[in-house]
Image: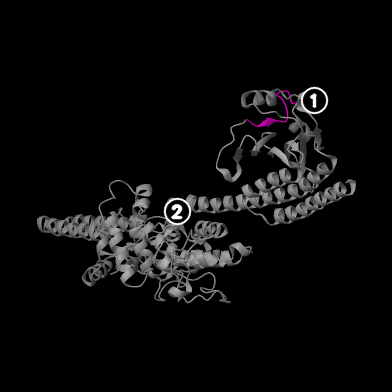
């Protein structure tokens, strides 16, 4: 009989050891924080056959132990973790208001000392205050008896949590003290659990740090330009909405599409960094509200020239009068000249706004106005920066100089200060940089056909995606974030291979990248905070997107989902003004 009993004990011991090994392996593999905590507590309960238990996590900021998981078989309690049920118990303070250590609570005492505390019967314990435990028992009819409280210490010896088990049970279900053998097993498990938990906390801290870094980048862009800053927050939100709709599709092309938890985080990072290259783009280009705008609106400079020409007309009038000319005829000529100058300036100002298509005849009128001259008597080569002086013609000026009212001068051409294309084009860019970095010519800028941007400006606007890819490719992303550069860097590509900067085709881009492309366009169309355009109606934006679908610029299947899943409505309700939101008949835009 004794031999049989010993064999049974050996079998139980072997089972526990094997289970401890299995738990150690599982702890090292588990990456989900809540599941990791549940695995620690449930594993310890299993090793000791405990009826209940609690896992506390150390809160360094508040110097307390916070309830993370609470389990009790008899009372059928499961709180915290993946249960979704909150724990309402207050944290356990490690120190009182005067800074004295809390040695009365067994859990805080174990944390403070870093040693295991085993109690056979809480009701007989003299060194600890179990008033709260007894009150809980009185309310529930439970009987808390044996306790095993083990601190979880990481590789540096710091306590990261506390594992507390209640009521060890024998094979027949009787509550008994925790055997010394199981205490050692739980301490071994606690050691492994502390390392796994500490690693998880470090990973979470790194993730939080990286998320904060992304926010810093977005805030930096925001500080540089509030318009692009808002864009950097809204595009990821819309990308997530559309991608989530794709994962929720139960039929059609997206029925089998899904993202893992890691892939969702990968998309979050890609969305947050999709325009990080804009930190290199001059804000006066990003926010160019008028054609003549650089760091300031150069229309003011041109207006001053018109004022000079008008003063010259007044001076010429009085000079002719003083020389005996016909005052009436001279006044009529002067008034006609002043009226013409006013009209010409009004036309130039209208062209500067960029609100109307510049037909050839309007450009011809600009050139005719530019032929008007005025006399400059001051040297325009002094007081300049070294860079601006380098762009000035080298020949000596002979003052006074006859200047044109509008001009495209040699100094208006700003050369590239670095190669327009990286020497080692390892990224596969297929772009054609303009000959110059900027062309500030006045007639050239005022003659822009649509909008306010020159070809050079558009290159710099587009270059942000090149810089984004270069910046992201330079980061040593771990395996679970390897696609961030591709997902973030593909939002200006088109399905037909005419996009920017790699001219990718549909099959070259994954669904998240294609979703971000739609999000980027729709946000720009609906944005109400751009200085260079008035907010568009929702229906107008959908209509424009539908044209891009027909031209194979955006994914037609994702666009249909964008409409049928109501993503456009969800986004509009969150980010558009009530005045922008109108009814949209989506049936006319869906694929037949």
Residue 276 in sight from this viewpoint: yes
* In this view, 454 is above or below 530: below
Which badge, 2 or 1, comes first in the chain's sequence?
1
Disc 2, SS: helix
* In this view, 44 is above or below 463: above
From the viewer's perspective, is 330 left or right of 479? left
Mark 2 surroundings within 10 Å by alpha-carbon count, few (fewer than 14), some (14 through 19), many (20 or more): some
When asked about the image quadrant of residue 325, the answer is: bottom left
- What mark, if any, has residue 125 been given in the picture? 1
For the stretch drawn in magenta, what is the main secondary structure?
Answer: loop
In whole angstroms, how far apart are the C-alphas of marks 2 and 1?
55 Å
When asked about the image quadrant of residue 52, the answer is: top right
Residue 216 at what x, y percent from top left? 55, 51
The residue positioned 32% from the left and 64% from the top of the image is 545
Residue 405 in sight from this viewpoint: no
From the viewer's perspective, is 218 left or right of 363? right
- Provide the residue designation for mark 2: 237
- Pick the residue in front: 350 or 276: 276
Give the residues drawn in magenta, as a range: 90-100
């Amino acid at each position: 009989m004794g031999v049989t009993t010993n064999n049974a004990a050996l079998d139980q011991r072997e089972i526990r050891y094997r289970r401890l090994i299995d738990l150690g392996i599982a702890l090292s593999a588990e990456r989900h924080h809540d599941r990791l905590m549940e695995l620690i507590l449930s594993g310890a309960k299993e090793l000791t056959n405990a009826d209940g238990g609690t896992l506390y996590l150390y809160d360094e900021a508040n110097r307390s132990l916070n309830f993370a998981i609470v389990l009790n078989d008899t009372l059928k309690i499961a709180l915290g973790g993946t249960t979704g049920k909150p724990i309402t118990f207050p944290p356990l303070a490690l120190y009182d208001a005067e800074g004295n250590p809390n040695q009365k609570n067994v859990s805080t005492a174990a944390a403070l000392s870093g040693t295991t505390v085993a109690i056979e019967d809480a009701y007989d314990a003299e060194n600890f205050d179990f008033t709260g435990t007894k009150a809980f028992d009185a309310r529930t009819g439970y009987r808390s008896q044996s306790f095993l409280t083990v601190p979880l210490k990481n590789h540096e010896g710091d306590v990261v949590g506390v594992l507390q088990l209640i009521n060890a049970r024998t094979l027949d279900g009787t509550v008994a003290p925790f055997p010394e053998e199981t205490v050692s097993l739980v301490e071994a498990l606690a050691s492994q659990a502390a390392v796994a938990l500490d690693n998880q906390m470090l990973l979470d801290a790194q993730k939080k740090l990286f998320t904060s870094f992304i926010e810093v980048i977005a805030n930096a862009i925001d500080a540089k330009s509030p318009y692009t800053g808002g864009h950097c927050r809204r595009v990821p939100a819309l990308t997530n909405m559309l991608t989530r709709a794709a994962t929720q599709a139960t039929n059609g092309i997206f029925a089998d599409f899904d993202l893992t938890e890691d892939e969702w985080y990968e998309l979050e990072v890609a969305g947050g960094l999709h325009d990080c290259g804009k930190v290199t783009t001059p804000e006066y280009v990003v926010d160019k509200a008028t054609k003549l705008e650089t760091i300031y609106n150069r229309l003011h400079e041109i207006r001053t020239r018109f004022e000079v020409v008008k003063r010259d007309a007044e001076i010429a009038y009085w000079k002719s009068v003083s020389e005996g000319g016909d005052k009436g005829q001279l006044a009529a000529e002067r008034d006609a000249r002043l009226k013409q100058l006013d009209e010409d300036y009004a036309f130039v100002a209208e062209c500067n706004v960029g609100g109307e298509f510049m037909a050839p005849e309007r450009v011809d009128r600009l050139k005719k106005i530019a032929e008007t001259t005025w006399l400059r008597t001051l040297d325009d080569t002094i007081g300049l920066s070294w860079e601006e002086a380098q762009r000035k013609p080298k020949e000596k000026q002979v003052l006074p100089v006859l200047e044109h009212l509008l001009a495209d001068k040699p100094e208006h051409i700003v050369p590239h200060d670095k190669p327009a294309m990286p020497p080692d084009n390892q990224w596969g860019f297929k772009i054609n940089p303009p000959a110059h970095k900027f062309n500030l010519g006045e007639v050239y800028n005022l003659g822009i056909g649509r909008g306010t941007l020159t070809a050079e400006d558009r290159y710099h606007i587009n270059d942000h995606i090149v810089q984004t890819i270069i910046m992201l490719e330079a980061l040593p992303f771990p395996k679970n974030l390897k696609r961030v550069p591709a997902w973030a860097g593909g939002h200006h590509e088109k399905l037909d291979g005419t996009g920017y900067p790699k001219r990718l085709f549909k099959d070259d881009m994954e669904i998240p990248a294609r979703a971000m492309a739609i999000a980027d366009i729709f946000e720009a169309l609906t944005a109400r905070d751009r200085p260079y355009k008035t907010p568009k109606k929702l229906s107008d934006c959908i209509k424009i997107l539908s044209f891009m679908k027909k031209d194979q610029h955006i994914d037609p299947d994702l666009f249909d989902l964008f409409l049928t899943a109501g993503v456009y409505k969800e986004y509009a309700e969150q980010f558009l003004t009530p005045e922008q939101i109108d009814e949209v008949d989506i049936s006319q835009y869906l694929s037949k």
